[in-house]
Amino acid sequence: MALGLFGAARHLRPAPYGDRLLPHAQGEWAARAQGAAVVGYDSRTGAPRWRYARAGHRPVAVVPTRGEAIALWDDGLLTDTDGRTVRWHRALPDAAEWLPAQGGTGVLRPLGRGILAVVAPRRVTAYRTADGDLRWVLPARKGCAFRPEGAVRRGTALLLAQPCADAAWTGQLVALDDLGRIAPDRTPLGNDLPGPRPRHLDAGKPLARPR
């Protein structure tokens, strides 16, 4: 009886972050914000396949990433779901100061190679979409602020407006890609998922003749 009560208590326990996910059946889908939820719609028929909501909150922006949907919520929480599970959560710093007025316009910016930039007035924060790992942070210059809605893509680069009160126009535009700010002689970052190191052949060991 005690085990049964313990199991029931586990099911009644509130979900982390107020998550409420109704999983989907197999098939291709496209996700978008619909009222207070993120909804995945069948790519062929348009019928709802899954629904993801958070108690007391609503999504302000949604972007697709290879069979998953990353959403920005009105409390500054960033979430990733594949329609079956919520894979990760990340909280944005200082969101209460800018998000109510900014909303989600231009905040989520895919940079390619599995990296998503989250553009806020004070900083750009980049996450690896596969696991939500923080890859790099670019703060705005002193006396300047990024404009999330003021960005233009040029090839693999994202040109982001950074208005400043006292700076040349060249200092009010920042070019970004998946490795961060584009600059000469920058140090490359390893943005790939950790994995086994490639095996190297022993140069001194002879190879067998083909049969």
Image (cartoon, rainbow, N blue to C red):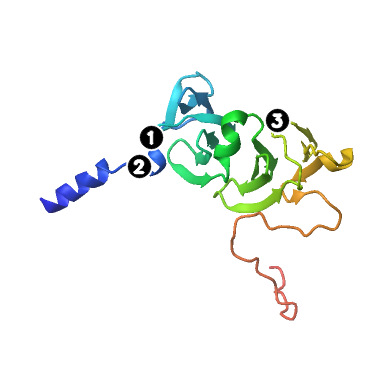
Q: Which residue is mark 1?
A: 20
Question: Which residue lies at the image location 81% right of the left edge and 38% below the top edge?
Answer: 165
Q: Which mark is residue 15?
A: 2
Cβ atoms under marks 2 and 3 closer than 8 Å: no
Q: Is residue 105 left or right of residue 29?
A: right
Question: Which residue lies at the image location 82% right of the left edge and 39% below the top edge?
Answer: 173
* Nearer the observer, 130 or 76: 76
Q: Residues within 10 Å of mark 3 (few under 14, many from 20)?
A: some
Observer-side mark, 3 or 1, equals: 3
* Nearer the observer, 46 or 73: 73
Expressed as whole percent of the image width and height from the top left, the position of residue 95 reads: 57, 40
Q: Earlier in the sequence, mark 3 or mark 1?
A: 1
Q: Is residue 96 left or right of residue 158?
A: left
Cβ atoms under marks 3 and 1 closer than 8 Å: no
Expressed as whole percent of the image width and height from the top left, the position of residue 183 reads: 83, 51
Q: Which residue is mark 3?
A: 149
Q: Is residue 119 left or right of residue 73?
A: right
* One can see residue 28 in this view: no
Hey, what amino acid is under mark 1?
Arg
For the residues labelled 1 and 2, the Cα–Cα distance comes to: 7 Å
Expressed as whole percent of the image width and height from the top left, the position of residue 15 reads: 35, 42
Question: The residue tagged with tag 1: helix, strand or loop?
Answer: strand
Question: Which residue lies at the image location 88% right of the left edge and 38% below the top edge?
Answer: 169
Q: Earlier in the sequence, mark 2 or mark 3?
A: 2
Q: Residues within 10 Å of mark 2 (few under 14, many from 20)?
A: few
Q: Earlier in the sequence, mark 1 or mark 2?
A: 2
